[in-house]
Image: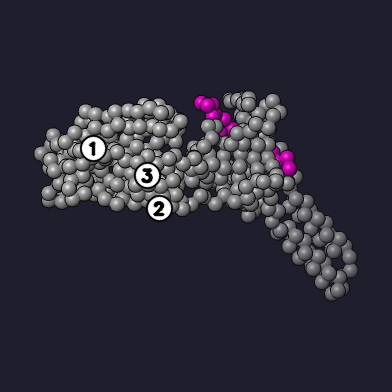
Amino acid sequence: MTLTALVGRAPSARRHLRSRAGGLALAAVVMGALAACGSTDAKDTAGATGAADAADETVAEVDVPDLTGVWESTEDSAFAQQAVIAGSAFTVNWVPQDGSEDSRLYWAGSFDAPTAEGAYTWTSTNDHGQTDLELLASGDDTKDFLYEDGEISYEASALGESGTVTLEQTSETVPAGAETSAAPAEVAGHVEVTESGMAASDGYAWVTAMVEYESLTGEFATVLFNVYDEGDNLIASAEHVEELSTEGTTFPMGTQVEVPSGETASRVEATVSVSDHGSRIEAMPVVDPIEAPASSPEFKIENATGDDWSDPRIQIVCLNDAGEIVGGGSEFPNTVPAGGELLLSDLGLIISEDATTCEAYVQLSSSM
């Protein structure tokens, strides 16, 4: 697919539509003149008045433009694009210059129809569930589009180039299969922190939250950790983000926090939030956790599948006899080859003295 950029080109003068209102106003004047030249009896006077009133009502009618259909970029556009407006949906695609049908999505968002004649601007909300999966799509949350004098214009950018796109309507018919609703994707699953804990040593603390989720494949979970001292004063905060690459499981999310000098970390509170992009990635398999004694935490990661595990994220959580979280750590190896294995040792975990067992959880990356 070939994209032609014509950035920096001066836009051509817009064509101006003939004013319907002006024509109707002239008709009203002519009708009034004819009435003045006719009979002056009561019946004719009433007829002239009625005609004038009808003309006034006609002039007051609002000619609201219907933007439904297909729009294509003009010769003076910075990029070659095609848009479809259908219902409340507004979709824009890059179109190739070689005549092929290999288009690429640029924008998928909402459309609000105008309610009056003349220039009109609407702010479209991006459907990230569609655009986040496309290399050449816009990552903006919203974008402004202007309709004026029969054209739609907006700013666009791609691959380091930017410019103004101007579209003209080429069809009032909506193509078969076009999206007609821009309702944002709803997050149907759930996510929650089931427990949290920490361990502190030498001015640092390792904080961990066990995050349970389901039906959120491809979304991103953010855990906020707040660390408190013995007097229940907040002394430090940190965040950790993970992609939820499986259909659902319970996975530890942890990070290291620097404890301010002179302060003692006593407890941690963790809360989780999740994105609502509606990602459509394929769910990765869940890998069973691997257990080892806290006295010698060593883990052998075995990949029994036929695919390499690229950039897996490994979170380690350590527990005491009561099952409470008392430390942990993380590792991020480059790969675990198909049918291969990887030994994790000398991990430098931060754990409490009463830790008895540690478990390693492997979260596979969706990019593998």
Colour approach in the figure: one colour
Q: Which residue corresponds to the image point at 41% horizontal and 47% vertical from the top-left?
A: 248
Badge number at residue 221: 3
Q: Is residue 338 left or right of residue 105?
A: left
Q: Mark 1 Cα within 10 Å, few/some/many (few <14, many 20+)?
A: some
Q: Residue at x 86, y 60 (%)?
A: 34
Asked if disc 2 and disc 1 are in contact, CB closer than 8 Å, the reply is no
Residue under the image location 44 percent in, 36 percent down: 366
Q: Secondary structure at mark 1?
A: strand
Q: Is tag 2's residue or tag 1's residue first in the polypeptide sequence?
A: 2
Q: Which quarter of the rendering shows the N terminus?
A: top right
In the picture of the structure, the residue carrying the numbered disc 1 is 292
Q: Which of labels 3 and 2 is toward the front?
A: 2
Q: Against 316, is 5 above or below?
A: above
N-terminal-most mark, 3 or 2: 2
SS under mark 2 = strand
Question: Mark 3: which secondary structure?
Answer: strand
Which badge, 3 or 1, is on the more N-terminal residue? 3
Mark 2 residue type: His
- Amino acid identity at mark 1: Ala
Residue 190: which disc? Answer: 2
Residue 16 shows in the view: no
Nearer to us in this view, 364 or 124: 364
Circle 3 residues within 10 Å: few <14, some 14–19, many ≥20? many
Which span is picked out in magenta?
155-172
Q: Nearer the viewer, residue 102 or 245?
A: 245
Which of 72/331 is in front? 331
**Residue type, label 3:** Ala
Q: Nearer the viewer, mark 3 or mark 1?
A: 1
Q: State which quadrant residue 7 falls in.
A: top right
